[in-house]
Amino acid sequence: MLKNMLTLFFVMLITVSVLSAEGEEKYGKEITLKEKTKVTDILSAPETFNGKTVLVEGEVLSVCQGMGCWIEVAGEKENEKIKIKVEDGVIVFPKDAKGKKALVEGVVAPVKAEACE
């Protein structure tokens, strides 16, 4: 149960770069942080990162197929993931981003119950 709750933490998007064989697609503002934070570290101590701006990198596991308002990014360990959620309509993630690498800078916050599923 605790592990499932931790995977519900997400990064409220400021910036994301999706890398593919065709090149890099950027969404949002320019990335300003240099040092990456491991998803594992965020999930192991979410209260430490709550409200802090972080830079994470990982494979896109899934994409909101409705409005393109979120992606899930894989962590370093098996079955780890973090949800990247944006305000509806601010950025629309491409529905074919699954399997591509994402570099995301944003603020860690708990998922709200009404978040787009």
Image: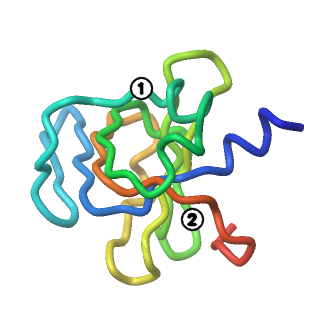
Depth check, front residue: 60 or 79: 79
Locate residue 83, reporting x and y percent: 55, 50
Tell me which residue sits at (57%, 65%) in the image.
65
In the structure shown, which secondary structural element does the residue marked by tag 2 occupy? Answer: loop
Quarter of the figure with the N terminus = top right
Q: Which residue appears at 49% of the width and 63% of the height? A: 85
Residue 87 position within the rendered picture, expressed as x and y whole percent measured from the top left: 44, 78
Report the residue marked by disc 2.
Answer: 65
Name the N-terminal-most of marks 1 and 2.
1
Residue toward you, 89 or 110: 110
Indicate the amino acid at tag 1: Lys
Question: Residue at coordinates 47% horizontally, 68% vertically from top-left?
Answer: 68
What colouring style does the render use?
rainbow
Q: Which mark is residue 99?
A: none
Seen from this angle, which residue lies furthest right?
1
Farthest-out residue, bottom: 89
For mark 1, what is the residue? 38
Query: Within the image, what quadrant is residue 101 found in?
Result: top left
Q: Quadrant of the C terminus?
A: bottom right
Residue drawn 22% across and 62% down? 27
Pick out the residue farthest to the top.
77
Distance CA(mark 1)–CA(mark 2): 26 Å
Left or right of 46: which side holds 114?
Answer: right
The vertical placement of 62 against 92, above or below, is above
Residue 46: x, y in percent? 59, 41
Q: Is residue 46 left or right of residue 76?
A: right
Question: Residue 20 at x, y = what percent?
Answer: 24, 36
Q: Residues within 10 Å of mark 2 (few under 14, many from 20)?
A: some
Look at label 2 and name its amino acid.
Gln
Q: Quadrant of residue 47?
A: top right
Secondary structure of the residue carrying tag 1 is loop
Q: Is residue 12 left or right of residue 16?
A: right
